[in-house]
Image (cartoon, rainbow, N blue to C red):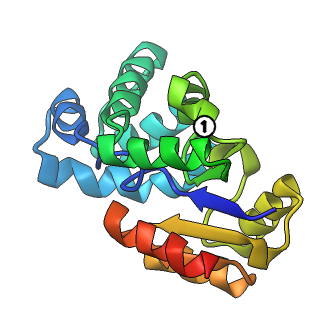
């Protein structure tokens, strides 16, 4: 079986729009807040808890973060990543209807993974994997091997799309076919070439 595997952020979804609201919650401008948002993300998306993530940012910014504040920030953060691109959804629905085997592989927290699994469109994917549940991140070879084991597939049987070249390179390093995501039109041409 051939699989088509998609990243989530900046592929299926638009880029987060939550940063201004999160920055305001910390009493900062976006430019002062955003570096901390990303700096602590690796540990969070590798299996850290919501509270650990927001408290680590809070310590860096000298802002106390309790459970209630953490829950508020997590809700804002998750919502920021929920804007699914209509043309991508249309593409996924078309592939699903055509019988394609679809999978999702995302560097994201366990909390975000739970939100995804609750969405109607998530049913389009036969397998949904999130780094927060797996304890490792793209482009580590380990996460691609976990994916392949879940799919019961050989690397060459998978076509992977991600917006980050490093993640594309990581997938290629384990033998998967992989392309950098630059939009639906380019992706469609990739499907055509893979079928020839």
Q: Residue furthest left?
A: 29
Residue 49 in sight here: no
| Image coordinates for residue 126, horizontal then vertical, percent | 72, 41
Name the one closer to the observer, 75 or 97. 97
The answer to whether residue 178 is above or below residue 105 is below
Q: Position of residue 113 (x, y in %)?
A: 59, 35
Residue at (35, 61) in percent of width and height: 184
Tell which of 31 and 16 is nearer to you.
16
Q: How many marks?
A: 1
12 vs 173, left or right, is left
Relative to residue 164, is residue 119 drawn left or right?
A: right
In the displayed structure image, the side of residue 109 where residue 89 appears, left or right: left
Q: To which residue does mark 1 refer?
A: 124
The image shows residue 51, relative to residue 164, as above or below, that is above
Image quarter where the C terminus lies is bottom right
Image quadrant holding the N terminus, namely: bottom right
Corner quadrant of residue 16 = top left
Quadrant of the image occupied by residue 78: top left
Q: Give the residue at x 48% y 50%.
A: 8
């Amino acid at each position: 079986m051939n699989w088509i595997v998609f990243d989530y952020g900046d592929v299926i979804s638009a880029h987060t729009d939550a940063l201004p609201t999160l920055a305001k919650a910390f009493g900062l401008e976006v430019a002062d807040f955003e570096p901390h948002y990303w700096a602590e993300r690796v540990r969070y998306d590798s299996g850290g808890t919501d509270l650990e993530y927001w408290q680590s940012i809070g310590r860096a910014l000298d802002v106390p973060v309790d459970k209630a504040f953490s829950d508020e920030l997590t809700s804002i953060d998750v919502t920021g990543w929920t804007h699914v691109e209509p043309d991508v959804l249309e593409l996924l629905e078309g592939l699903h209807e055509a019988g394609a085997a679809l999978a999702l592989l995302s560097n994201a927290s366990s909390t975000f993974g739970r939100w995804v699994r609750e969405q109607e469109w998530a049913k389009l994917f036969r397998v949904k994997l999130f780094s927060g549940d797996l304890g490792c991140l793209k482009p580590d070879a380990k996460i691609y091997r976990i994916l392949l084991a879940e799919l019961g597939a050989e690397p060459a049987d998978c076509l992977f799309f991600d917006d980050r070249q490093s993640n594309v390179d990581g997938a290629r390093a384990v033998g998967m076919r992989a392309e950098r995501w630059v939009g639906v039109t380019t992706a469609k041409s990739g499907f055509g070439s893979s079928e020839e």
